[in-house]
Image (cartoon, rainbow, N blue to C red):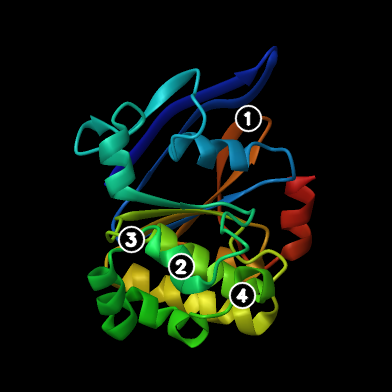
Amino acid sequence: MFEIKGIEKSYGKHQVLQGVSFTVGPGEIIGILGANGSGKSTLLSILAGLERPNGGFFCIDGKDLLKDSKLRNNTLAYIPQENPLIEELNAWDNLRMWYSRAELDKELKNGMLKLLRIDEFLKVPVSKMSGGMKKRLTIGCAMKGGPKLMLLDEPTAALDMVCRNEIYDYFESYRSSGGAMIISTHEIQEIELCNKCFILKGGVLHPYTYDGDLQHLIGILE
C-alpha cells in the first residue's frame, strides 16, 4: 500500500497543493481530475521526485519515497505528458539506454514490451513514429525492472481511439498483475478505468465518483 499524506507545495504566495492525502493499493487505479493549472502535474512531479514539496510524505512499508531516491527509482515509473525519447534514435536504441541486451530480448519475446507491441517498430526512428508508438515506447522505457506503481500524466492526450485502446489494454494487464497506477486525466474512458477518483481544485483534493453525467463533471471542474 502506498500512502500519500499531507503533500504541500507553494510557489511564492501561491499554494498549489494543500495537504493532499490518499492511498493506492495493489491493482488499484487512482484518477486525479482537475482543470488546467490545478496542480495535477505538480503533484505527479513531486511523487516522481522531480520537484520538492514544502511538506508531506509518500510512503510504502513505512519508508518515505520522497527521501529515498534509490527505493523510489526501483519502485515507481513516471510517464510525463511530454515526449522524453531521443528523436534521432530508433525504438531499439532508446530501449538499450535502460535495458541490457539480455533483458531486452526477454521482454520483447514474452514480457511487458511484447504486450506493448514494441517489437513491431523496433527500427523506426522516434522522429517518424506516430503518437501512439511514442507513448508505448515511453511506457516501455519507464517500466524497466517491473515497478509496483505507475505515475501517468494525461497518458492518452492527443492519441486516436485505436491507440488509446491499445494503451488501456496494457493498463488492464498491469493492474491484473497487481500493479498500481495514479493517473491525471481529462478522458472519460480513463475515469471509467479508475477504482477511485479525486478532483484537485484550489489546491485541495476532493473525493469524486463519476456517475456518467459529463456536464456535472465539467461544472465541478470550472
Tell me: residue 34, above or below residue 209: above
Q: Secondary structure at mark 3?
A: loop
Q: Are marks 1 and 2 in contact (CB under 8 Å)?
A: no
Q: Secondary structure at mark 1?
A: loop
Depth-wise, is mark 1 or mark 4 nearer the camera? Answer: 4
Question: The residue under label 4 is which amino acid type?
Answer: Gly
Q: How many angstroms separate mark 4 from mark 3 (CA)?
A: 19 Å
Depth-wise, is mark 3 or mark 1 nearer the camera? Answer: 3
The answer, for residue 193, to whether it is visible in the render is no
Label of residue 203 in the image: 1
Which residue corresponds to the image point at 60% horizontal and 73% vertical from the top-left? 125
Sequence-wise first label, 2 or 3: 2
Sequence-wise first label, 1 or 2: 2
Residue bearing mark 4: 132
In percent of width and height, residue 50 lies at: 49, 34
Residue bearing mark 2: 93
Q: Are marks 1 and 4 in contact (CB under 8 Å)?
A: no
The answer, for residue 139, to whether it is visible in the render is yes
Question: The residue under label 3 is which amino acid type?
Answer: Lys
Which residue corresponds to the image point at 68% horizontal and 13% vertical from the top-left? 12
In percent of width and height, residue 164 lies at: 60, 76
Quarter assignment of residue 171: bottom left
Residue bearing mark 3: 144
Q: Residue furthest left?
A: 61
Q: Secondary structure at mark 2?
A: helix
Sequence-wise first label, 4 or 2: 2
Q: Residues within 10 Å of mark 3 (few under 14, many from 20)?
A: some
Q: How many angstroms separate mark 4 from mark 2 (CA)?
A: 18 Å
